[in-house]
Image (cartoon, grey):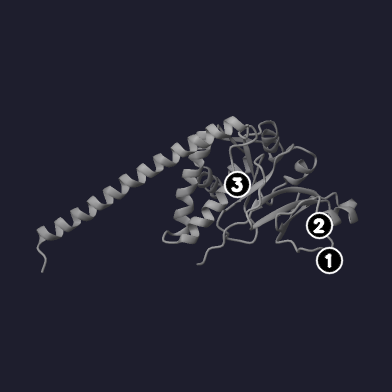
Amino acid sequence: MSTPAARDTSLDDIRQEIDGIDDSILDLVARRLQASEKVRSHKSGNGSLVSSPIRPAREAMILRRLLERGGVPPELLVRLWRVILTSSTLFQAAVTLHIPRKLASQMGLRLRLRDHFGALPVEEYRDEAQALLQVNMNSGDICAVEAASAWADAFAEGGAGEARIIGVLPVLRTASVPEVLIFGHAQALATGDDETVIVSEGKLPRDFLPKPLWQLKSGSRRISSLPGFLSEHEAPLIGLVRSNAALGVKVAGRYPSPIEVSP
């Protein structure tokens, strides 16, 4: 039978091991931030920071790779790495998140934004159109709107400028339709598992393929999310646009698909 002194010694050893692990984690985080500084210097040299320091495709591939390794609960892993990724972004350039007041008033969505974007400063506006206008005028910033809100009219009328949907929340898929859409000027890059959002003035033809993953009404328009990293200049979208001019189809953006995790 172990004595109290032996048990205490064993517990002290475990605590010392934990302290050592914590020190190692801190050292690695510091190294990662130093690497982010190198990225900032590189981007400053080639001008790629001008549009946006955010890289949705890169961030998605990082999270997918780490989640495949396992060993850490998915929710914990995503929260930890979102803090690291956001800190890395802010090391490269200042970014402000613009949101409509209706979204800001919903505590669940506000907390989701905080978990994802961490210390990013947030500014609130009267409605979706005003929030989109800010990201139009500030190419390094981003805008978040509820997927089911009336953002599509302002977008179709040019209110977002060149900004497009670059991501959705939550990152871990919890339902067929995302809660929040993120607009920005980040370069759209395929990750191998992506979705394309289009805005139209009516329903898509019943025989159109691929079938939408989800559809919503937004203001006077409809939004549809299609599987794949699609271009309006290639099939199947080019055929849809040419054969259905009255629909006024516009590509609202492309984003990495939310990550599926086993229960």
Q: Element type at marker 1?
A: loop
Q: Element type at marker 2?
A: loop
Residue at image point 17% right, 58% down? 10
Q: Which of marks 2 and 3 precedes in the sequence?
A: 3
Task: Residue type at mark 2: give it.
Answer: Ala
Q: Which of marks 1 and 2 precedes in the sequence?
A: 1
* Residue furthest bottom as drawn: 1
Q: Position of residue 263 (x, y in %)?
A: 50, 67
Q: Residues within 10 Å of mark 1 (few under 14, many from 20)?
A: few
Task: Residue type at mark 3: give it.
Answer: Pro
**Tag 2 residue:** 235
Are the residues tagged 2 and 1 within 8 Å (C-beta)?
Answer: no
Q: Nearer the viewer, residue 22 or 249?
A: 22
**Tag 1 residue:** 207
Q: Nearer the viewer, residue 201 or 193?
A: 193
Q: Which mark is residue 56?
A: 3
Q: Nearer the viewer, mark 2 or mark 1?
A: 2
